[in-house]
Image (spheres, rainbow, N blue to C red):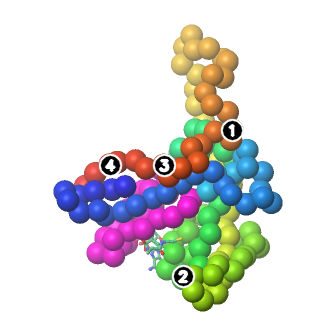
Amino acid sequence: MVELGEEIVALLTIGAARDSDLDLSRTAEIWGIYISPKYWRRRIGTTLVEEAEGIFKSRGFKNAVLWVLEGNQQARRFYEAMGFALDGESKTIDWGAPLKAVRYRKALQPVEQEPAPGASTGCDAPGPGWLPKPLLARNSSAE
Ligand SMILES: CC(C)(COP(=O)(O)OP(=O)(O)OC[C@H]1O[C@@H](n2cnc3c(N)ncnc32)[C@H](O)[C@@H]1OP(=O)(O)O)[C@@H](O)C(=O)NCCC(=O)NCCS
């Protein structure tokens, strides 16, 4: 969550991917991103998605997916600008009326890290697949 004083500017939720056709040990999901309209087109969405991708990569995930309503052209243009592309999957969501959602996917570039001098070469970090199931919220401040 991004707050500016008392105001909530943005909300990002991420977690494990939930689709049975995916390799869940390699794929994470952006569950939702919402920016307060008066802050649109100020790169806040870009910053949050980049933050999410950094978290995914640091946990060993290779791909990110997300679902968006087919008719949400604003969000689709945004995700496409972030390098996501349709992967061919779609589903119908019943929110009182049937709405079609489409899935986007992005291959995550590996993290390039120089090992610190004397650092262990063993891997003691949580391996791929580790990501909290519940909402992962981070607090930060908008500038
Ligand atoms: C989609 C959303 C998260 C984008 O956040 P944002 O902070 O406004 O996006 P950014 O400023 O980082 O935009 C990055 C790029 O995405 C594209 N983009 C963003 N909004 C766009 C729009 N309305 N039309 C076309 N392209 C758009 C542009 O390429 C933009 O770069 P530019 O401004 O240099 O041209 C925001 O509009 C939003 O919260 N929408 C309502 C909620 C929603 O639909 N969420 C998605 C649910 S799955």
Kind of residue at disc 1: Pro
Residue 136 is tagged as 3
Q: What is the x, y in percent for residue 100?
A: 66, 83
Between 54 and 109, the one lying in front of the other is 54
Per the rendered image, the range of residues in magenta is 30-52
Residue at which label 2 appears: 72
Kind of residue at disc 4: Ser
Task: State the image quarter where residue 8 is shown.
Answer: bottom left
- Whether residue 101 is visible here, answered yes or no, is yes
Q: Is mark 1 within 8 Å of ligand 1?
A: no
Tell me if residue 39 is in the magenta stretch: yes
Which quadrant, please, contains the N terminus?
Answer: bottom left
Answer left or right for 28 relative to 8: right
At 64% across and 79% down in the image, what residue appears? 93
Q: CA distance from mark 1 to mark 4?
A: 26 Å
Number of residues whose C-alpha sits closer than 10 Å to that of mark 4, classed few (under 14), some (14–19) or many (20 or more): few
Task: Report the mark closest to the observer, 1 or 3.
Answer: 3
Residue 100 is tagged as none
Residue 140 is tagged as 4
In this rendering, is residue 85 above or below 98? above
Q: CA distance from mark 1 to mark 3?
A: 17 Å
